[in-house]
Image (spheres, grey):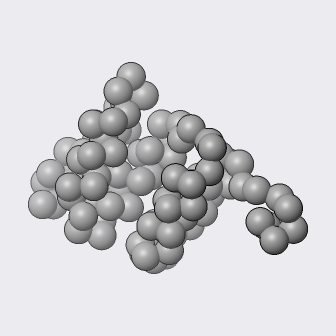
């Protein structure tokens, strides 16, 4: 996409992260996160919740916790459930 001058939007990032989660390709999800971090987009709760799941399921509980803590008012029931699951696994 970037080679063609087009850049992903939030729904595209969301779909990429969900695909990586379903296929358990956490290394690819982390690359998507790195690309998103370099963009000027502000992740919504859907993306942040997916990132919590990515890092939790890959065993990086500290990064999952960090994302959760920075969410602030974007936290919702899904965010809390993802963190409870993360803490239960860790």
68, above or below 58, in the image:
above
Determine the residue located farthest toward the top in the rendered image: 73
Picture coordinates of residue 59, whole percent (x, y) = 23, 68
Residue name at image x 27 percent, y 36 percent? 69
Residue drawn 24% across the image and 47% down it = 65
Evaluate whether residue 18 shows in this view: no
Q: Is residue 88 visible?
A: yes
Q: Residue at x 20, y 45 (%)?
A: 84
Residue 43's x, y, as percent? Answer: 54, 41
Who's the residue at 15% across and 60% down the image?
A: 89
Q: Quadrant of the C terminus?
A: bottom left
- Residue 84 lies left or right of residue 81; in this view the side is left
Q: Is residue 2 left or right of residue 46?
A: right
Front residue (pair 57, 4)? 4
Looking at the image, is 49 positioned above or below residue 76? below
Q: Tag count in the figure? A: 0
Q: Position of residue 20 (x, y in %)?
A: 51, 69
> Image quadrant for the N terminus?
bottom right
Q: Is residue 87 left or right of residue 66?
A: left
Depicted 44 relative to depicted 11: above or below: above
Indicate the position of residue 72 as horizontal and vertical percent values.
35, 27
Q: Residue furthest right?
A: 4
């Amino acid at each position: 996409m970037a080679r063609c001058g087009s850049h992903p939007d939030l729904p595209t990032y969301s779909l990429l992260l969900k695909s990586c989660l379903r296929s358990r390709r956490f290394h690819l999800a982390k690359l998507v996160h790195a690309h998103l971090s370099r963009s000027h987009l502000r992740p919504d709760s859907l993306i942040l919740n997916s990132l919590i799941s990515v890092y939790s399921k890959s065993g990086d509980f500290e990064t999952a916790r960090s994302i959760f803590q920075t969410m602030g008012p974007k936290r919702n029931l899904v965010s809390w459930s993802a963190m409870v699951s993360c803490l239960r696994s860790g």
